[in-house]
Amino acid sequence: MSRFIEDHDSSAIGLAGFRGAGKSTIMRSIAEKQQLPNTSTLVPAPVSHDPADFCRHILQKVAEKIVEQEPIRRGALVNRVLLTRFYGFVVAGILGGISLLADALSAAWPKFGTASIIGLTVLGYAAAGFFYTALVRPRRRLYRYQSAVVVKASMILDELNYEIEDGTVAKNVVKLATSGELSDESSTKRKHRAMTRVDSASCLRDLLTEYCRQPGRPRFVVCVDELDKLPTAEALVVTINNLKDLFHIDGVHFVVSVSIDALRSFEQRGLPDRDAFDSSFDTVIDVGWLTVKESEDVVTSRANGFHPHLAYYCHAWSGGLPRDLLRAARRCVEIQRAAKEPLRSAELITELIQADLLQLIEGLLGSTSQPEAEMPLWNLRGALLESAHKGTITEQVDAMRKLRMHESHVINGAITRYCAGLYIRQMALMLHPVGAPAPQWAEAQVEQWFELLASVTASTASDMRIQELRLDACARKLPLS
């Protein structure tokens, strides 16, 4: 992503991946300037939002980031009253000096007359006021040398955060000799209306354009996160269509988190049916799953003394999803900490898998409202709570696969995850047998086995046909006999 941004003047990048794949972490890295020397801002998207409100939300975040470029002068619009007073003292000093000079240059004697007295008085008043304004009052309140784009961003923030009223008042008063008075007055007040979506988009475009035209041609990266959590694909399409007006401003890069459906749509670009995804983004980057070695690096970098092979099991059980990987590793540490003596890898993994599966099944039983869906779940729960499983590992997996319900994607995914747990547990018993020396296997071969196991766990979010293919591959390729 960093390389793509550096190689283009402007871009619109989609960041696709399952929940927990690390999209938010990547965006925070970009926004915190760990990867790019740019000005970046991270904009979390509310799950439910109005297009106009969301555009104003982005505008506010961008304006706040621009104002932060000059932290000492933040919010430093010129104090008009103070400046008027300052310049008034300067004018008074000039007039006092002119009065003194007029007396000094006059032909009349004495040289020190009424004009001089008035001049000295005015000059003293001006000097005292100037001294107080320029030295006693903080000088930083007098001079606000802000760039035009920062001033514009500050004014936008004021308009977004406050209701602004502009008014003018004209008043004429005539006093009569008899102490009477004639007066007339006229006033005009104008109140700023709330920005519409079109106003917000236009204002944001102008602000970003002006910012990127500054000396040095700075870039601005806007990271819009959480869009993949919108309730429907239609809601995501509407949001992307509202953002399209802002894409491809010279010097501006948009990074937007999108769903896996958006990635699949982008992969089909060039076909007759085009939608908002393939017509909006320059590229969609798939975050993907971690490999065995990447999972090992992630876990061992966060937990000293965590055995690499135990990280392999956590990788297989998480499917290579970073968030689930760290949860599995953390749970292994908690299990070992609660035990009275050191546990073997097979014991740790068995307890981890059993606890996670039991929690999953209990949650499904509590949420399902279909009586026909409860029977497979109760069967899974009963088999899970048995201390010993009957038959070979292949027979156990086949028995579980027979519980599949073609109408329920959730139940089928739970069964596949249960089967993956059986395979992982069996691999732990095979690679780290109790009371016997561990067999010697080539490291590359072991990595391939755990990648295959992780693919089964990851397939629970996919079509049932893919789940079946992955389970069949495990039955053929894993050394389970």
Image (cartoon, rainbow, N blue to C red):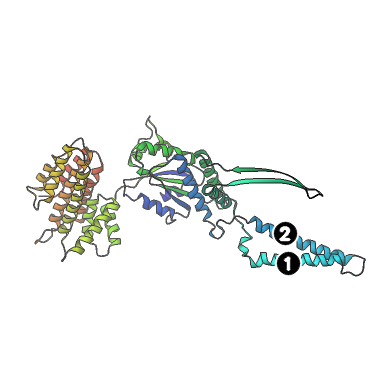
Identify which residue is drawn at 45% across, 45% down: 254
Residue type at mark 1: give it.
Ala
Q: Is residue 201 above or below residue 125?
A: above
State the residue position of label 1.
127
Identify which residue is drawn at 38% across, 39% down: 236
Residue 130 in the figure: left or right of residue 268: right
Q: Earlier in the sequence, mark 1 or mark 2?
A: 2
Alpha carbons under labels 1 and 2: distance apart: 11 Å
Residue 477 visible: yes
Badge 1: few (under 14), some or many (20 or more) residues near its Cα, within 10 Å? some
Figure quadrant of residue 131? bottom right
Question: Which residue sits furthest front?
Answer: 178
Residue type at mark 2: give it.
Gly
- Mark 1: secondary structure: helix
Between 152 and 315, which is closer to the camera in this rendering?
152
Q: Is residue 130 above or below residue 210?
A: below
Q: How far across and down, in percent of the image, does residue 158 sit?
A: 55, 50
Report how many numbered discs are placed on residues in the image. Answer: 2
Q: How far across and down, in percent of the image, does residue 5 sit?
A: 45, 48
State the residue position of label 2.
88
Q: How far across and down, in percent of the image, does residue 8 sit?
A: 47, 46
Question: Which residue sits furthest top?
Answer: 272
Residue 8 visible: no
